[in-house]
């Protein structure tokens, strides 16, 4: 299992907060419509400051509470954020809970459909907040989808992936093979003790991005496992805090209005 069901998102470092930790940033559950008529769920958190926008691509859980809470964290750090659910076509509307049997639904995902839902979520973010050209951030499966969006989805500003899968999935070539197609600055955050994504694959991805002249930053936390950002009890608090700092600096450089 690549996550902890009862985990909460790590807080952004206090010196980077731009809104109070309590009040004013609660995520609102939305029902959105994709280009093919599919209705799906999303959670929107608006920031009082609104430095830019970000679309959150979850792990295999879809719109689990962790990701609604994470949207609030981004709002408190100054960015409008929307987290989407992947499973409107196969499981109806969310959000999802610990009893959701996600595996069969993940097996039915198609990358173009996820990208259509991402596009609809980005449009909703723009319509509600005025945030044009958002970034994407994804985790595990969502990291894969974020990197793939960098190659395929127009109108973004940057893409971020936490321990994003790098090889072929869902019958399509993966981020390593698609590196030359990525059109936005990319930030990749990985764990050196991740048994699902060998360091050699991360280095291969880094080299492919170098060869394609894609602006990018790749960072490997030597002792961190897969899914270090949502481990309980602050087990990997240092890596999570550093990830927040790298991610917000990256957004400030490439996405902030």
Image (cartoon, rainbow, N blue to C red):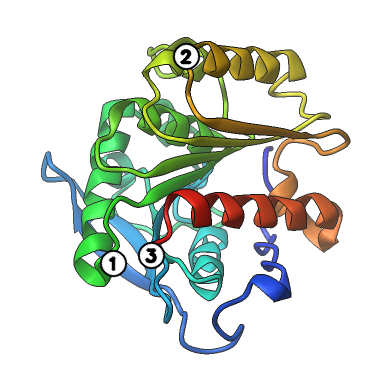
Direction from residue 233 to residue 101 in the image, left or right: left
Q: Which residue is mark 2?
A: 212
Crowdedness near tag 3: few (<14), some (14–19) or many (≥20) residues, C-alpha within 10 Å: many
Q: Which residue is mark 3?
A: 43
Q: Is residue 153 shown to the viewer in this render?
A: yes
Q: Quadrant of residue 63?
A: bottom left
Percent x, y of residue 201: 67, 15
Percent x, y of residue 133: 30, 50
| Disc sitting over residue 30 in the figure | 1
Q: Is residue 58 above or below residue 26?
A: above
Q: CA distance from mark 2 to mark 3?
A: 35 Å
Badges 2 and 3: C-beta atoms under 8 Å apart? no
Percent x, y of residue 130: 24, 67
Badges 1 and 3: C-beta atoms under 8 Å apart? yes
Q: CA distance from mark 1 to mark 2?
A: 38 Å
Quick one: label 1 or label 2, which is nearer the N terminus?
Answer: 1
Crowdedness near tag 2: few (<14), some (14–19) or many (≥20) residues, C-alpha within 10 Å: some
Residue at x-position 56% and y-position 16%: 210
Percent x, y of residue 165: 57, 26
Crowdedness near tag 1: few (<14), some (14–19) or many (≥20) residues, C-alpha within 10 Å: some
Badges 1 and 2: C-beta atoms under 8 Å apart? no
Q: Quadrant of residue 13?
A: bottom right
């Amino acid at each position: 299992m690549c996550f902890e069901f009862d985990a909460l998102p790590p807080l952004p470092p206090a010196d980077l907060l731009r809104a109070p930790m309590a009040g004013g940033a609660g995520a609102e559950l939305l029902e959105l419509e994709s280009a093919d008529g599919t209705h799906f769920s999303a959670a929107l958190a608006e920031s009082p400051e609104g430095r830019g926008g970000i679309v959150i691509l979850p792990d295999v859980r879809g719109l689990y509470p962790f990701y609604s809470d994470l949207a609030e964290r981004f709002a408190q750090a100054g960015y409008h954020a929307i987290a989407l659910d992947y499973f409107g076509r196969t499981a109806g509307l969310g959000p999802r809970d610990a009893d959701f049997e996600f595996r069969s639904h993940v097996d039915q995902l198609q990358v173009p459909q996820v990208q259509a839902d991402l596009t609809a979520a980005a449009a909703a973010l723009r319509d509600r907040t005025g945030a044009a050209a958002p970034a994407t951030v994804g985790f595990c499966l969502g990291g894969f989808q974020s990197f793939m969006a960098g190659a395929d989805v127009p109108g973004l500003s940057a893409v971020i992936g936490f321990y994003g899968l790098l090889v072929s999935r869902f019958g399509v070539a993966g981020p390593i093979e698609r590196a030359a197609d990525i059109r936005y600055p990319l930030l990749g955050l990985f764990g050196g003790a991740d048994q699902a994504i060998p360091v050699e694959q991360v280095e291969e991805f880094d080299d492919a991005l170098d060869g394609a002249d894609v602006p990018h930053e790749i960072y490997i936390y030597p002792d961190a496992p897969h899914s270090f950002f949502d481990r309980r009890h602050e087990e990997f608090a240092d890596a999570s805090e550093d990830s927040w700092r790298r991610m917000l600096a990256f957004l400030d450089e490439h996405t902030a209005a």
